[in-house]
Image (spheres, rainbow, N blue to C red):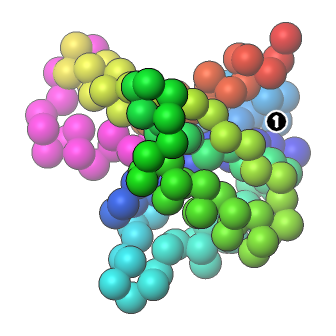
């Protein structure tokens, strides 16, 4: 029984899963989104949910800095609602303000990764941070 974290963007969805005890988050992959063809990665997401025996999903909620809900947060809420309908799993939302900025800073400072390398892993790392923040807050 694992929890899955999702960093939903306009072009990709970063995926992370918890360990079996729900203590740590590990990055899994990045799913491409093609809105023009209405392909939102749900088939691959279902495969991962089944493979990791996921019982709960946590989506990053990119609120505005003033805590309001803008277009990106509305898109994440809509994605979460669709996921809930398709997979019949509970969906929680985790405030993800500045998560991508933190992830990029970490890649620059600790991994000294080039812009091209950062682009390939940033969404997965952001999903890890979203899920880890959720796990840390709910393990108390």
Does 65 sit above or below residue 7?
above
Where residue 104 sits in the image (x, y, percent)?
28, 28
**Residue 136, x across and y down, in percent:** 71, 17
The residue indicated by pointer 1 is 20
Residue located at (22% from left, 14% from top): 109
Is residue 134 or residue 47 the one in the foreground? 134
Label 1 crowd (10 A; few <14 / some 14-19 / many >=20):
some
State whether residue 99 appears in this view.
no
Relative placement, left or right, of 42 versus 114 is right
Q: Is residue 91 visible?
A: yes
**Quarter of the figure with the C terminus:** top right
Quarter of the picture holding the N terminus: top right
- Is 17 magenta? The answer is no
Q: Look at 75% across and 74% down and name the residue there.
A: 86
Q: Is residue 46 left or right of residue 41?
A: right
In the image, is 3 to the left or to the right of 38? Answer: right
Residue 108, given in percent of the width and then of the height, sits at: 20, 21
Say which quarter of the image contains residue 61.
Answer: top right
- Of 44 and 136, nearer the camera is 136
* Residue at x 39%, y 88% (from the top left corner): 37
* SS at circle 1: loop
Please give the range of residues in magenta.
Answer: 110-124
Percent coordinates x, y for residue 24 in the rendering: 67, 25
Q: How many marks do you count on the picture?
A: 1
Which residue extends farthest bottom? 37
Q: Which quadrant of the structure image shows residue 16?
A: top right
* Quarter where residue 130 is shown: top right
Front-most of 57 and 35?
35
As displayed, is residue 42 above or below residue 100? below
Say which residue appears at 70% left-offset and 36% top-offset.
Answer: 18
Q: Main secondary structure of the magenta part?
A: helix
User: Would you say 51 lies left or right of 107 here?
Assistant: right
């Amino acid at each position: 029984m694992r929890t899955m974290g999702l960093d939903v963007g306009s072009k990709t969805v970063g995926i992370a899963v918890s360990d079996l005890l729900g203590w740590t988050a590990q990055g899994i992959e990045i799913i491409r989104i093609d809105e023009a063809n209405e392909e939102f990665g749900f088939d691959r997401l279902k495969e991962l949910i089944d493979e990791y025996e996921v019982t709960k999903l946590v989506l990053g909620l990119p609120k505005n800095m003033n805590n309001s809900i803008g277009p990106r947060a509305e898109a994440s809420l809509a994605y979460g609602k669709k996921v809930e309908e398709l997979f019949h799993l509970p969906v929680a939302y985790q405030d993800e303000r500045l998560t991508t900025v933190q992830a990029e800073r970490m890649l620059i400072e600790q991994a000294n990764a080039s812009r091209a390398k950062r682009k390939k892993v940033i969404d997965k790392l952001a999903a890890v941070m979203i899920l880890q923040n959720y796990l840390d807050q709910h393990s108390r």
